[in-house]
Image (cartoon, rainbow, N blue to C red):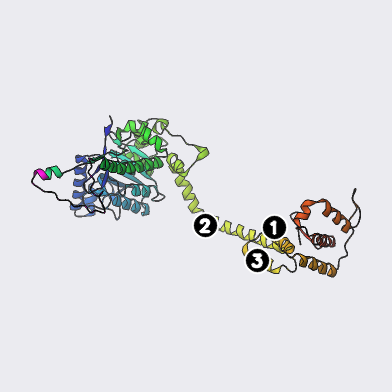
Amino acid sequence: MPFESTMQVDRSGRIWAMRPDEMMIAQAVRQREAARSAQSTEEVAALADGEILDGSDFARVVDGVAVVPVRGLLLRQFSFYFWSYEEIARDVALAQADPAVRAIVLDIDSGGGMVAGCDDCTRFLRESGDKPVEAFVGGTAASAAYYLASAASRITVGSGAMVGSVGAVIEYIDMEPLFEAMGARIVRVVAEQSPKKRLDPESPEGKAELQALVDAAGQEFVDTVAEMRGVTSAEVLDRFGQGLVFDGGEAQRRGMVDARGTMSGVIGALSGARDMETGSGLAARTNETAAPATAAKETSMNWEDLTLAGLREHRADLVTEIESAAKSGAASDTETAVAAALEKERARVAAIDDIARPGAEDMVAKAKAEGWTAETLALEMVKADKAKGAGYVADLAAQDGEAAVVPKRPAQTEGSGGTPEEQAEAAWERDADLRAEFGGNKDAYLAFKRREAAGNIHQFNGKKAG
């Protein structure tokens, strides 16, 4: 049966995303007090299975899997009495850096906590490192706790677990009438520059302000959960309860979690001691009661529009394998890329040298230095020649006079006749594109054709360049 949950705002203006659960909070406080009173790390470890993760107060390592607790009321910063996003992120970072740890599990039993810092912690969990981060819900993952769980590559729920509370409702508790009944006199003076600093929550303006606050926090909650679970915000609003909390089976059918099982089964699968996929061991037995995969996750893989988030959601193991292979092959890939780049550069410089001509030394040097292709250099040399105008004609005439090669009369083709000069004259008169190419400078064109007949024009990829 679903339950309603709330987002609370206390009189200090802080926003909370949690379900009121005094029993859960009290249990978390007792656990932290018991750990603080322990005289050694051995006594702390005795409170739970495994060994304490080096550098942590509560996270433990079982069969190479780091188990990071997420319990009770969640605060933004470290507290001696409650868990915090700061502590959770620290423990996950320690586990990612510990060579003895191969995977991480968030052990969640929390009704939620402060909104401030929750989104940052969620995104850190998703991007914390190469080791997989999964979540196990043994009791409750509501509001901020489910917010954090959504970052995991896989969410498993135990028997009797409750999941959800995606949404926001403000409960503004006004204690002033009680104080006044006790004889207190409350004096409040608000600066003229900030008349909205103490809005009456019962007034239309005050209610609108509170609504804007909770709507903004609630929308961020919905959008981040959608991103982490690989669905749309509309799907979260449609299927994730709009603030309701569901039992494990219903949460799985709605796509909010991925499987039902036990903590030992999750640890066994991640440690390699048991193989869920081959159907052996306790992990396989605990997963037998789970709904079919299509029911557990109502979204299917879209291979035509594949994203990293989508692939990580459906095949986290494959993403980890690909990332590891990429890192191991980085060195050899770099050497291959360098060799290919050197060969490409040698070919570019050789092509430039092949079309270089006297008088263009500065342009050739610039082409080599600035990475021009041979085609670019050829085009720039033609442009430079055309830009010379009358001087270009004189230069060509001088070069023609110095040329040692006698122009050869081209073979006559059917329908053509006359000397090369006559053929060039005829081409000039009939071809408007040719005239446009040489800017209407007929003398430049005729000089160009004389050089072509003399063999002073190089060919490059079907384009002529002086």
In which image quadrant can residue 213 be found? top left
Mark 3 or mark 1, which is nearer the start of the sequence?
3
Q: Dot 1, how many residues are within 10 Å of its Cα: few (below 14), some (14-19), or many (20+)? A: some
Residue placed most toward the observer, 447 or 99? 447
Left or right: 425, with 12 as reference point: right
Q: Report which residue position mark 1 lands on.
A: 375
Secondary structure beneath dot 2 equals: helix
Residue placed most toward the observer, 348 or 294? 348
Secondary structure beneath dot 3 equals: helix
In the image, which disc is placed on residue 331? 2
Q: Which residue is drawn at 52% across and 57% down?
A: 331
Left or right: 260, with 29 as reference point: right
Q: Report which residue position mark 3 lands on.
A: 366
Which mark is nearer the camera, 3 or 2?
A: 3
Mark 2 or mark 1, which is nearer the start of the sequence?
2
In which image quadrant can residue 437 be found? bottom right
Predominant SS along the magenta part: loop
x then y, percent, for residue 332: 54, 56
Distance of label 1 from label 3 (alpha carbons): 14 Å
In which image quadrant can residue 450 be found? bottom right
Q: Give the vertical position of 369 relative to 179 (above or below).
A: below
Q: Dot 3, how many residues are within 10 Å of its Cα: few (below 14), some (14-19), or many (20+)? A: few
At label 3, the amino acid type is Lys
Distance of label 3 from label 2 (alpha carbons): 33 Å
Q: Give the range drawn in magenta.
A: 180-202
x then y, percent, for residue 343: 64, 59
Secondary structure beneath dot 1 equals: helix
Q: In which quarter of the image is the C terminus?
A: bottom right
Mark 2 or mark 3, which is nearer the start of the sequence?
2
Q: Which residue is drawn at 25% across and 50% down?
A: 195
At label 1, the amino acid type is Glu
